[in-house]
Image (tube, grey):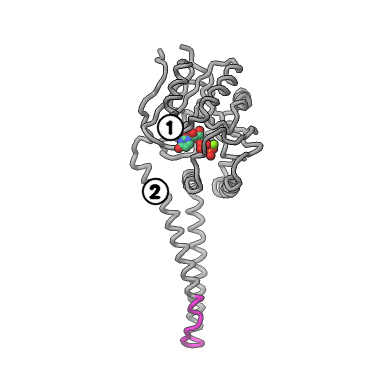
Amino acid sequence: MQNPQISIVIPVHNEQEVLEILYERLTKVMDALNRPYEVILTNDGSKDRSAEMLNEFHKRRPKQFRIIHFNRNYGQHMAIMAGFEHVLGEYVLTMDADLQNPPEDIPKIIEALDKGHDVINTYRMNRQDKKWRIWVSRLHNYFRTLIAPALVMKDEGSMLRGYARKIVDFMASTKETSTFIPALALTFAANPTEVGIAHEERAAGDTSYNLYKLIRYNFDLVTNFSVVPLQVFTMVGILISVLSLIFVVYLFIRRLVIGPEAAGVFTLFAIAFFIMGFIIFGLGIVGEYIGRIYQEVLDRPRFVVKEIVEEDRD
Ligand code: UDP
Ligand code: MG
């Protein structure tokens, strides 16, 4: 059997409302390209009818559609990672199942890969999301540029992206249990580029991310790719130590000159509370890193594939 040239990897978590439209639009775009391709869909522990629908796609096009079923939910990036472990094509594209990035933009990504770029990041030219979501992204983008300048990309939210196979193999070979694929790709890239794509409202269904998940996810992103928070904490710690020392010397001299006095207790409390707060915050940051180390040293399989539905290859 001839290997496909293009592999499209799509994570799926409770997307029964959109899968059929996805199938229609994706195959239409890909068939028109006239290049051999495959679609790998990872069912990330869906609880709705997504699993049966995906298997049905495989029945319709057994050679092109390969379905990976997880035993439970591991998150979008692990679902993509599982796809990466099985791709056959030289070009690998990722996209969301919810059609927020139109499949019609896929040719743009392929064109960039044809030009020899190895990582194709994308930015949404007309973002259609809830206000708070856009705001959180902006804030996060700002901090990310500050904290991990190596990972500069205009936009990280859209998952319609393209990678040369070599980059994908590198990514699949990392054993990290939580990661952010577009950022990881950049650390391996030699010739990355960015292209603008359209962005639509979710075709149907609802986002799997809430505010808490989003904050967690941003912490993960930062601790995964940078130790700047630890360094900032150390620097501020040094600063506070120096200031406290000056303060202590000042109070000591006052004690000698003016004698014992009790005024200013509340100011002292305020300062003490501020510093305590800072210490607790710092413990939290250290904890984030330790938690990450803990997860990695457990060395459990990062996901469990229950079943792969695909055509036998020879
Ligand atoms: N997804 C997944 N596992 C999850 C959450 C999401 O595989 O635990 C998939 C989801 O089916 C979709 C993509 O990841 O294809 C993006 O998810 P979503 O649209 O909910 O995120 P948003 O667009 O709000 O960032
Ligand atoms: Mg979405």
Residue 31, image quadrant: top right
Q: For the residue labelled by badge 2, is the local secondary structure a helix, a strand or a loop?
A: helix
Which of the image's four quarters has the C terminus? top left
Q: What residue is shown at x 36% (from left), y 32% (from top)?
A: 71
| Vertical order, 77 against 141 (above or below) | above
| Vertical order, 243 against 131 (above or below) | below
Numbered mark located on residue 48 in the image: 1
192 horizontally vs 264: left or right: right
Task: Tell whether position 229 is magenta.
Answer: no
Frontmost of labels 2 and 1 is 1
- The first of marks 2 and 1 along the sequence is 1
Asked if labels 1 and 2 touch by Cβ distance under 8 angstroms, the answer is no
Q: Residues within 10 Å of mark 1 (few under 14, many from 20)?
A: few
| Vertical order, 77 against 148 (above or below) | above
- What's the magenta region? 255-267
Residue 166 coordinates in the image, percent (x, y): 50, 27
The residue wearing badge 2 is 291
Residue 161 coordinates in the image, percent (x, y): 56, 31
Q: Residues within 10 Å of mark 2 (few under 14, many from 20)?
A: few
Q: Amino acid at mark 2?
A: Gly
Q: What residue is shown at x 54% (from left), y 46% (from top)?
A: 148
Numbered mark located on residue 11 in the image: none
Is any atom of residue 261 visible in this view?
A: yes
Calculate the distance from the C-alpha at mark 2 to the C-alpha at mark 1. 32 Å
Task: Tell whether position 264 is magenta.
Answer: yes
